[in-house]
Image (cartoon, rainbow, N blue to C red):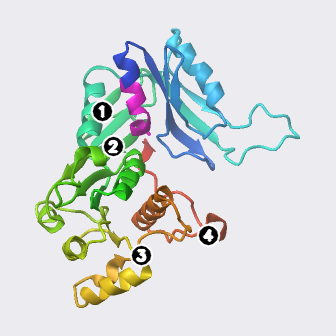
Amino acid sequence: MLAEVWPFVEQRRGAGQRIVLARLVRRAGPGSRPLGATMAVASDGGWTGSVSGGCVEATLLDEARSVLDGARPRLTAISPGADLMPWEPAPACAGELGVLICPLPSGPVYAAIGAALATRRPLALGIDLRPPFHWSTAANRAALRCGDEHFVEELRPGPMLLLVGATDLAAALAALAVPMGYRVVVVDPRPAYAQRDRVPAADDVVCTWPDQWLATVAPEPRDAVLVLTHDPRIDDRAIRAALARPVGYVGALGSRDTHARRLARLAGAPGLDRLAGPAGLDLGAASLAQTALSMLAEVVAVGNRRTGGRLRDAHGRIRAAETASPGR
């Protein structure tokens, strides 16, 4: 997806490098990456991203570098394992891939993408699948003006993750969540804790009571709240306020005994059955980093309406629904 490679794109472009994108715009059969998966290849030889998880990237690197050297942009069909001998096993993602290889858009389109990602505004991005592969942007898919054959990716702001308590665990959670697209806000009423450098990966650190902060925003069902301070004076206010809003996930740190006492204090609070406690998936987490992984894994699972069990024991599709699509 474009958001995954955009930091590389901006860094290389700022250094004066030319960039070609290889974007997965069609697929027939199974695949390990969703539509919209993108590689960015710079003229200094550097590259990032993938469209298949490793099966075809070497071939696409050669094609992208040929475009950097002056070849025409192209929509190419490529099949993982096409170069294998008949008796060699094909990779699981053996469906034919349609990959558009073209230069990075310039001018208003480039600026619109960067602004949308930086400010977390939604943006519909379309590209015609016939030469000259015209790019277009609009506030939403319906407003796009594309040709008969096109590909659309909708850049959407990530969900909010509110962390109550500027603790070491909050810093570990933010470091995991920000690269996953979450907008991480840390709220702590204690001035000694609510310091920007304590949670450097977070988008914002605010010194205020969590219920007061929640009263100023409009959370959505995609958003999540994790309560981390172990101080009932802070945690209980945060939980009551979060459960009163349309937040998709509310979880609280603590042992089973701590959570039992918490439930006793909050008895009768509306929505208490929605509270996840102890928060996290059963990973046997021992370290701070493992605890952060456990908690964030549950946030992701609930957001995708999954239980968080082992994939080997599950059935059905592995990924959540794709947000990019071809059109005609």
**Among the 4 quarters of the image, the one containing residue 125:** top left
The quarter in which the C terminus is drawn is top left
Q: Which mark is residue 153?
A: none
- Between circles 3 and 1, the one closer to the viewer is 3
For marks 2 and 4 on the same chain, the one whose residue lies earlier in the sequence: 2
Q: Are marks 2 and 1 in contact (CB under 8 Å)?
A: yes
For marks 3 and 4 on the same chain, the one whose residue lies earlier in the sequence: 3
Q: Is residue 49 above or below residue 260?
A: above
Give me the residue at 51% from left, 30% from top: 48
For marks 1 and 4 on the same chain, the one whose residue lies earlier in the sequence: 1
Q: Which mark is residue 155?
A: 2
Q: Are marks 3 and 4 in contact (CB under 8 Å)?
A: no
Give the residue at mark 4.
314
The quarter in which the N terminus is drawn is top left
Q: Are marks 2 and 4 in contact (CB under 8 Å)?
A: no
The amino acid beneath tag 1 is: Ile
Q: CA distance from mark 2 to mark 1?
A: 8 Å
Instruction: Provide the secondary structure element on which disc 2 rests.
Output: strand
Q: Are marks 1 and 4 in contact (CB under 8 Å)?
A: no
Q: Main secondary structure of the magenta part?
A: helix
Q: CA distance from mark 2 to mark 3?
A: 33 Å
Q: Is residue 9 magenta?
A: yes
Give the residue at mark 3.
278
Q: Which residues are magenta?
A: 1-10
Q: Is residue 75 visible?
A: yes
